[in-house]
Image (cartoon, coloured by chain):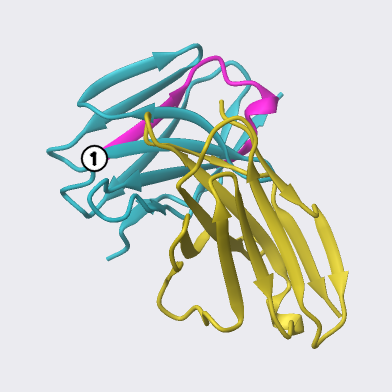
Chain colours: A cyan, B yellow
């Protein structure tokens, strides 16, 4: 079982719709959770971090964390074509040298 | 967010030569930096964790004698690909921990092509 699993997609949504990206992780002691956006040919860009159960909102983005289910998600409201990218879920265990484990990423396409 | 720079942004070298990539944290001190490699259409793969003032910790399967890492200061880590071969052609990305928030910020990456 992979440490961090994401649906590779591609996920296609129309402009203005809500895009829902999901991620599960296997290490129960994981403590920090992140969503990165990576455009083709570019390095990842941090868009959200979440550390406790529940929802965290930042503009059009909402991260949701459920530690009991080992599940973290990212919702993108009012999706725009510029949101088209690969979204990487990342999990960090602060007791394990702080290294971060990444999912394979979900490719999102927002169609105008 | 915090700023991490990498140099060069791209490099082409001949097989058998060595290439050094620099990673700098510009507005914060980073006791820990990370080196990743990404092949086309694949996910990030952690190569090694670079700790200031001590030896790097390499992931399983990564040759420490081929990928030399030096973290000589709190703002600079270098990765040297020694005796590069075409299969080393990849996108190399460094990142640094913003310790007080546990967030990790990435440099812009270095695209290496070995001919």
Whether A44 is among the magenta residues is no
Q: How crowded is mark 1: few (under 14 residues within 10 Å), some or many (20 or more)?
A: some
SS at badge 1: loop
Residue beneath the point at 50% across and 14% down: A60
> Where residue B70 sits: x, y (%)?
58, 64
Residue B69 lies, with reference to residue B33, above or below; the image says: below
- Tell me if B14 is positioned left or right of A51 in this view: right
List x then y, in percent, for residue B93. 63, 54
Residue A50 image-quadrant placement: top left
Name the residue beneath numbered marker 1. Answer: A31
Q: Does the magenta stretch include residue A72?
A: yes
Q: Quadrant of the N terminus of chain B?
A: top right
Q: Quadrant of the C terminus of chain B?
A: bottom right
Asked whether the viewer can see residue A41, the reply is no
Residue A44 at x, y percent in the picture: 59, 42
Where does the magenta region start and end?
A71-86
- The chain to which mark 1 is attached is A
Image-quadrant location for residue A86: top right
Q: In this view, does A45 lie to the left or right of A33?
A: right
The residue lying toward the viewer, choosing from A102 and B84, is: B84
Q: Which residue lies at the image location 37% right of the left edge and 39% below the top edge?
A: A22
């Amino acid at each position: 079982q992979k440490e961090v699993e994401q649906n590779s997609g591609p996920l296609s949504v129309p402009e203005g719709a809500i895009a829902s990206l999901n991620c599960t992780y296997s290490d129960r002691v994981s403590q920090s959770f992140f969503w990165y956006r990576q455009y083709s040919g570019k390095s990842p860009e941090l868009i959200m971090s979440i550390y406790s159960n529940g929802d965290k909102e930042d503009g059009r983005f909402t991260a949701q964390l459920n530690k009991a289910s080992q599940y973290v998600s990212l919702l993108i409201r009012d999706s725009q074509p510029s949101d088209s990218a690969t979204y990487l879920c990342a999990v960090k265990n602060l007791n394990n040298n702080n290294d971060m484990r990444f999912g394979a990423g979900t490719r999102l396409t927002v169609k105008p | 967010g915090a700023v991490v720079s990498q140099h060069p942004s791209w490099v082409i070298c001949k097989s058998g030569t060595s290439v050094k990539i620099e990673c700098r944290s510009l507005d914060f001190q980073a006791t820990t930096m990370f080196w990743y490699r990404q092949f086309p259409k694949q996910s990030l793969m952690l190569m090694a964790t670079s700790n200031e003032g001590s030896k790097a910790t390499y992931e399983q399967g990564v040759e420490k004698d081929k990928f030399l890492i030096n973290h000589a200061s709190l703002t600079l880590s270098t990765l040297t690909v020694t005796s590069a071969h075409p299969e080393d052609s990849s996108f190399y990305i460094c990142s640094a921990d913003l310790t007080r928030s546990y967030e990790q910020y990435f440099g812009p990456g270095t695209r290496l092509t070995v001919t």
